Image (cartoon, rainbow, N blue to C red):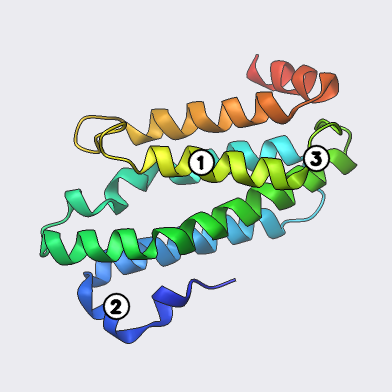
Amino acid sequence: MRHESFETKDKAEIISPAILKNWKNLESSVNKIFSQNNQNAIDILLKISQQLKDHKNLHYTHCKDDKEKLREFYYSDLPHRIDFAAKKIVDNFILGQKQNLYRKDISKEMVERIYKKRILDLHNPKIFPPQKLNYQTIHKLMFEEIINSLSNNNGKRYLKKIRK
């Protein structure tokens, strides 16, 4: 799944080639992790949290380009990035249910909505000012929280085992 905005020439001209490359690389890495067969759903989300360690570098406030144009692009493209991520989380949730790691008493629609809300909060500079926070830590904690909230007893035991 490609973000339409990555393929749109006028938007690509707004942001620096380095940022565009970072976003494309991140998306490609996430797709690659999700496409590997025979993976545990929890392991997948932990790998994704590691991939997001450079997220701070993708935020427009850390760029030397025209901040106003970057801000406009960043927020206009945000729905595409959130939809992409939410779809991956839902796919992971379905996989985790099949692997008997995730709860059966919640719906994939609920998982998607809760995840989207968390991401919107994460991108709200009043809640999480990008200049002051360590995004690696925030993403790691967010994914650990997601895993804990989705996991059944089997998933929680597995998570506890791999944390040791």
- Label 3 crowd (10 A; few <14 / some 14-19 / many >=20): many
Indicate the amino acid at tag 2: Ala
Q: Indicate the secondary structure of the residue bearing disc 3.
A: helix
Image coordinates for residue 42, horizontal then vertical, percent: 71, 35
Mark 1 to mark 3: distance in Å? 21 Å
State if disc 3 and disc 1 touch (CB < 8 Å): no
Measure how far apart labels 1 and 2 are at the Cα level.
Answer: 27 Å
Q: Percent from the top left, x then y, of residue 96?
A: 80, 40
Q: Which mark is residue 117?
A: 1
Q: Quadrant of residue 11?
A: bottom left
Q: Determine which residue is flagged by label 2.
A: 12
Front-lying residue, 61 or 118: 118
Q: CA distance from mark 3 to mark 2?
A: 36 Å
Q: Is residue 95 above or below residue 153?
A: below
Q: Position of residue 29 (x, y in %)?
A: 53, 58
Q: Is residue 75 left or right of residue 94?
A: left
- Are discs 3 and 2 less than 8 Å apart at CB? no
Percent from the top left, x then y, of residue 104?
A: 86, 34
Location of the C terminus (image quadrant): top right
Q: Looking at the figure, which quarter contains the N terminus? A: bottom right
Q: Mark 3 — residue?
A: 96
